[in-house]
Image: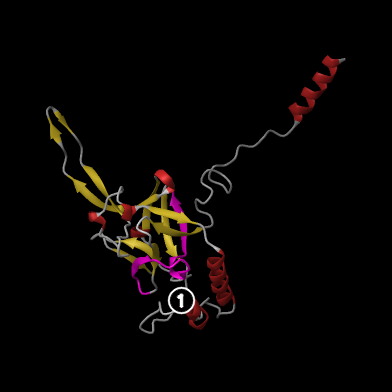
Amino acid sequence: MVLIELLLLLSVLGHAEPRRRRDAAARGGVYEHLGGAPRRRKLYCATKYHLQIHPSGKIDGSLEEDNPLSILEITAVDVGVVAIKGLFSGRYLAMNEKGRLYASEVYNKECEFVERIHELGYNTYASRHHSTTQPPVTGGNKRRAQAKKPWFVSINGKGRPRRGFKTRGTDKASLFLPRVLGNKDHEMVLSLLEGQQHGTGHRRVRTKKLRPLLGGRLGGGLALTRTDF
């Protein structure tokens, strides 16, 4: 009798739909954010500054906890490679061939950074396309191939960016802790989205709505007229 019940159970299981493998690249897989919705984070440097992206194109650090210019969108463009965009400035973090950090209005190859996770949860972000090529090392009968020294995103102890060729991945200035947004941050994001919804057809951001959030950070009468937030 028991044998018959086991045979019936196996028969039912045999006709059941096979379990599908989870697609690692799809939502909920290993690369959950690859090509999908960006992660909204604040990058907190080990030098105690939050990385911020200005509408003027300037990159620096801020000691303020509730700074809208430090709210970022991090999107994977390849496995281990990300693009970092300022949500309120609408500009992308970028590094040029001279190792200078700047905020680009449009996405280009200089906006791509290799993201690596290190001890204690800190990340480093190295330029994907710019680095220092070191000469090959010779010793005895062996000859090593040319090595490349990465150029890292780095904010020093004064809140200023370092040139890429002066950085190392082990420096405090190159270590960033991705922080989830707090309640105040979410309120600022909501205000931004509401401003977009009530704006014109091309999603122009109303400066008057953001000025209370940005305070004196616009500077020089600079208005937020980005159309590609």
Quadrant of the rendered structure where residue 61 is?
bottom left
Q: Amino acid at mark 1?
A: Leu
In this view, 148 is above or below 69: above
Residue drawn at (22%, 50%) of the image: 132
Measured as percent of width and height from the top left, residue 24 is found at: 54, 42
Horizontal side, residue 163 vs residue 70: left or right: left
Q: Which residues are magenta?
A: 56-78
Measured as percent of width and height from the top left, residue 203 is found at: 53, 76
In this view, 106 is above or below 28: below
- Seen from the viewer's position, the closer of residues 133 and 171 is 171
The residue beneath circle 1 is: 214
| Residue 63 counted in the magenta span | yes
* Quadrant for the N terminus in the image: top right
Measured as percent of width and height from the top left, residue 99 is found at: 25, 59
Residue drawn at (35%, 83%) of the image: 220
In this view, 125 is above or below 105: above
Report how many numbered discs are placed on residues in the image: 1
Most extreme residue toward the right is 1
Which color scheme does this rendered protein use?
secondary structure
- Seen from the viewer's position, the closer of residues 81 and 201 is 81
Give SS at disc 1.
Answer: helix
